[in-house]
Image: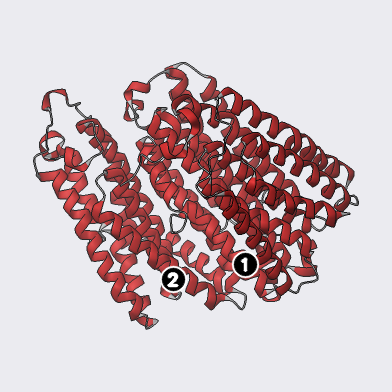
Amino acid sequence: MILFYLAGSVFFASALIINRNMIANKVLVIGFLLLQIGYTGFIFMFQNVTEATYFTPDALAILMIATLTIIAIPTLLHRYDYVYKEQDTPSNKGLYYGAMVIFVMALTAGFLASHIAVTWIFVEITTLSASVLIFHRRNAGSIEATWKYIFVSSISLVLVFIGILLLSLSMGDQYQAGMQYDTLTRLAPTLNPFWLKLAFIFIFTGYTAKLGLIPMYTAGIDAKDKAPTPAAALFSSVLMNLGFVGIFRLYVIIAHSSILAWVNTIILITAFLSIFVATVYMMKVRNIKRMLAYSSIEHMGIVMIGIGIGGLGYYAAILQLILHSFVKSSLFLQVGHLYKTFKSKEIFAMGNYFKYNAPGAVFLLLAFIGIAAIPPSGLFVSEFYLIIALIKAHALIILIPLLLLLTIIIWAFGKNMFKILFVPPMNVDAQCMEKVNPYETLSHYLLLALVVYLGFFPPTTFVALIQTTIHSLSF
Amino acid sequence: MISILLIVFIISLLYFSIANRLMTYVKILALQGILLFGVAFIELIEINVINLIFILFETIVVKAVAIPLFMRYIIKKNKITREAQPYVPYFVSLILVTMIIVATFLIANYIRDTHLNKIYFIAALSALFSGLYFITTRRKIITHVICYVMIENGVFILSLAVGHNMPVLVNLGILLDVFVSVFLLGIFVNKVGDVIDEGDVTQLSKIKD
């Protein structure tokens, strides 16, 4: 089935790239979405059944793929002029949709991969397709962003590859066993700690380019700024999840070895520094897309603090990761409407949004509550669990600065949001504003409602899947 | 024999640090490709024939011929100035690269592991760190790509060090190579050249907060 899914996606992608007809384009996109939904349903039914040697839908993969499928539906279905109108040639459009399809496929396969090198291959494919998406507008800005993204991502992937080589060295004489995650977890107590530590450093550093922590977060920020908004919505949610999965699968191996405490310290330091960097930039940033990108860095920092602290923190981390994906992707989709209305991404050029697009403005207000983790946002639940975990671990030295930084971030975020909603904009010509179709805001509301639902009334399957994932850390 | 090839490889890093023309850089890359061909041939002679042919083909055709020729084509087509224009004097680069090599030598001696062949480790790490150093000190975009390929060469050596155990990993390293040479170079450097003349990285610093 996985091979059928991969072949089907490649077929849809190539058909989209070749095709020049508008109606055929729509049909192909919907066809791919049906394939994606069908495959998600399939892995729900056949959990933990390994296919084609290298793909196993375990609990984490199912959670992530379900998240991806839900977010992919609005990002792919929104009308094309959501993406910049001036580029509306059929070939560009085909390339854009083709790259989107390949991107979603690579993410799905990357989540499923049960071999460390297979994950790496699919992360590489996401880099390729993402750079096509960033390059979409073909101007100086997008070239710069694409160049930086490809370069930083390639260097990061080289680091991950070195990490994989070092991991194979840590196996010593047991190299015939292969590098499946299961095998490595089983062998974990016998792995050479020195090489394992080195391997962790290289793989962690490499995947931070996708996850968005220091030191490699920079390229991702530019990418989210310059990519079309639906693509940016995917970059700042599910692509970061792929980076998380890459690190988490290695973390499961390490949880069974002797170096867990050392790794936790490193994760906590990096995560805390990332939140600090995000706070500093959030205070001075003037471009709304970059502000949202820095906010993603902050959330990923929170997720990794949950992983580093352990206990209830694991549950909080995975819940936070999934809920953040929904809030952030809906916010990015709304930025598309903001850009359409004000023709600018600069915050000082926006304002009085209630007057120009009331449904969007109400959404923005609710989404601010959602992202700031104020109840009834589901993120409140996950951050609350995280704080309990920090208190239980007696980690006040992290907790107090963390709360301070989060307060500053809420202030900075709120200041910009309320400026957009209520303060009159500078030099805006209301005559040349484009009207936004209010029904397009519906998908944003649905994503946001999902956050409340999953946070406060989580379905039992959802909780069971998260618990199975955490269970893999200890047994 | 392998030691001689790898030592020449390390010396080529020192030469890279003082070379001042782009074409010299490209020639060093070609030389490194030939050296890697020799190392791969001697090291992997026992593995499966088809796999071996694939790896050797990749080193000699892609690393030693195709990438250098393609670089030359890009330099000619975009009329990039022949000088490398580093930010720091060549002498400083030479000292620093020497220090990198000495440091990796000390690290490799510190590690005691029977599965690791020291000379591979030294060559690979030196190429990795010198490559990163060159990227930060050279001004042109094309030199960044050249240095990236050099880091790749280092990684290839490291994968050879574990290669007779796991030929799969060597093949993956090659995948990375093909990825770079086809994508990063082929499509992109041409596009950058169309929009930004001289291919200078200082022009790629407009996006900021």
Residue A198 — which label? 1
- Residue located farthest toward the top when viewing the structure as drawn: A21
The picture quadrant where one finds residue A371 is bottom left
Q: Where's residue A257, x and y in %?
A: 62, 75
Looking at the image, is mark 1 or mark 2 nearer the viewer?
1
- In the foreground, A182 or A100: A100
Residue A4 seen in render: no
Please state the chain letter of the residue tagged with numbered disc 2 in the rendered image. A
Vertical order, B47 against B84 (above or below): below
Residue type beneath disc 1: Leu
Q: In this view, does A321 lie to the left or right of B153?
A: left
Residue type beneath disc 2: Leu
Vertical order, A300 against B20 (above or below): below
Q: Where's residue A211, x and y in %?
A: 46, 55
Count the marks: 2
Picture quarter with the N terminus of chain A: top right
Please state the chain letter of the residue tagged with numbered disc 1 in the rendered image. A
- The residue shown at (77%, 65%) is B118
Badge 1 marks a residue whose secondary structure is helix
- The residue shown at (24%, 46%) is A286
Q: Is residue A231 left or right of residue A387?
A: right
Q: Mark 2 points at which residue?
A: A268
Vertical order, A401 against A92 (above or below): below
The picture quadrant where one finds residue B96 is bottom right
Badge 2 marks a residue whose secondary structure is helix
- In the foreground, B202 or A313: B202
Q: How far apart are marks 1 and 2 (CA)?
A: 17 Å
Mark with earlier residue (1, 2)? 1
- In the foreground, A467 or A239: A239
Picture quarter with the C terminus of chain A: bottom right
Q: Where's residue A452, x and y in %?
A: 29, 56
